[in-house]
Amino acid sequence: MFQTIGIAGSGLMGTAIAEVNILSKFNIILFDSNSEQLNQAQKKISSRLDNTNQNDIKVGKINYASEISLFKSCDLVIECVTEDENIKKRLLDKIGRIIDKHTILATNTSSISINRLSNSTGNPGNFIGLHFMNPPQIIKLVEIIPNYKSDIQTVDNIKDYIAKLNMQFVISDDQPGFIVNRVLIPMINEAVHALESGLSDVQSIDKALKLGANFPMGPLQLADFIGLDTCLYIMQILIKDFENPKYKPCHLLEDYVRQGKLGRKTGEGFYKY
């Protein structure tokens, strides 16, 4: 079973996934070529681990790395960089050349084809989609997306790994958006259309879905949490891959992204933070 997990990318998701693994007693190598971002991740994780140490909770160890070569000792490496296919392919190619032939390589992509990405890994049989939801500390679901060459043992090992994280999984075919974002992001897009058309205001739309449909969070607030740029990017992938106009991004969503209003991470989206 896995002992050391490599995580490539110390942004929002990479840092959160690292934290979940540490709390499940896995040892972590968190890599990022951006030293400033890696330092920010270290501060954030150290702060949270301080709280667990005060409660005598046993956790795994973490090594913050600026050299990708350290992944050579990992049993599993999870790629968590920005949702850009070309960037992911280049990084997966680099990692694939370093890791042992038995190491499983996974991507945390939320929408990009696993089959297309697998061609850049050098070992598709050990490659798999592993989509953690945001934030994984709270949302205990992971989508597993095998590619057309994924070994059965690779899938089984990942199932066991997710169980060790005390999380649940669903298996998805490699279709655009997988399960969650195939349903969720078009719903968010429709909520933005409702706002743009003047149907109601931001607070009322969110209130209606929270109370009327029992949503824990309104769609516009959730969009802010995900990142409006991420929502837009996934919509663009859906319309490109499905060639169906129902997935066309709302103009208002595009406008917010152009203005740099991306949600919580920039301090303003549909709400101000």
Image: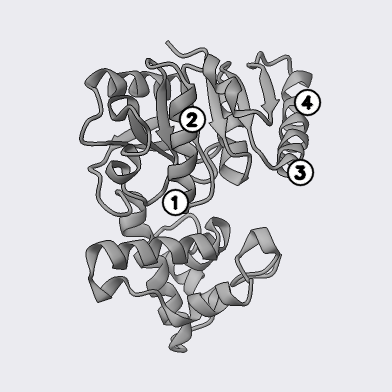
Instruction: Identify the residue at horizontal 51%, vertical 12% (top origin).
Output: 3
Q: Earlier in the sequence, mark 4 or mark 2?
A: 4
Neighbour tally class for label 4: few under 14, some 14-19, many 20 plus, Cα within 10 Å: few
Q: Is residue 165 visible?
A: no
Q: Amino acid at mark 3?
A: Glu
SS class, disc 4? helix
- Which disc number belongs to residue 50? 4
**Residue 111 — which label?**
none
- Distance between the alpha carbons at the discs numbered 1 and 3: 23 Å
What amino acid is labelled 4 in the image? Asp
Q: Position of residue 249 (x, y in %)?
A: 39, 74
Outermost bottom residue = 198
Across and down, in percent, residue 271 comes to 63, 70
Instruction: Say which amino acid is labelled 2.
Output: Ile
Q: Position of residue 122 (x, y in %)?
A: 35, 30
Which residue corresponds to mark 1? 86
Separation (CA) of disc 4 from disc 2: 31 Å
- Label 3 Cα neighbours within 10 Å, binned few <14 / some 14-19 / many ≥20: few
Whichever of callouts 4 and 3 sits on the residue coming sooner in the sequence is 3
Quarter of the picture holding the C terminus: bottom right
Callouts 4 and 2 close, C-beta under 8 Å? no
Q: Could you say whether the residue bearing mark 1 is in a helix, strand or loop?
A: helix
Mark 2 vs mark 3: give the one in front: 2
* Residue bearing the label numbered 2: 95
Which mark, residue 36? 3
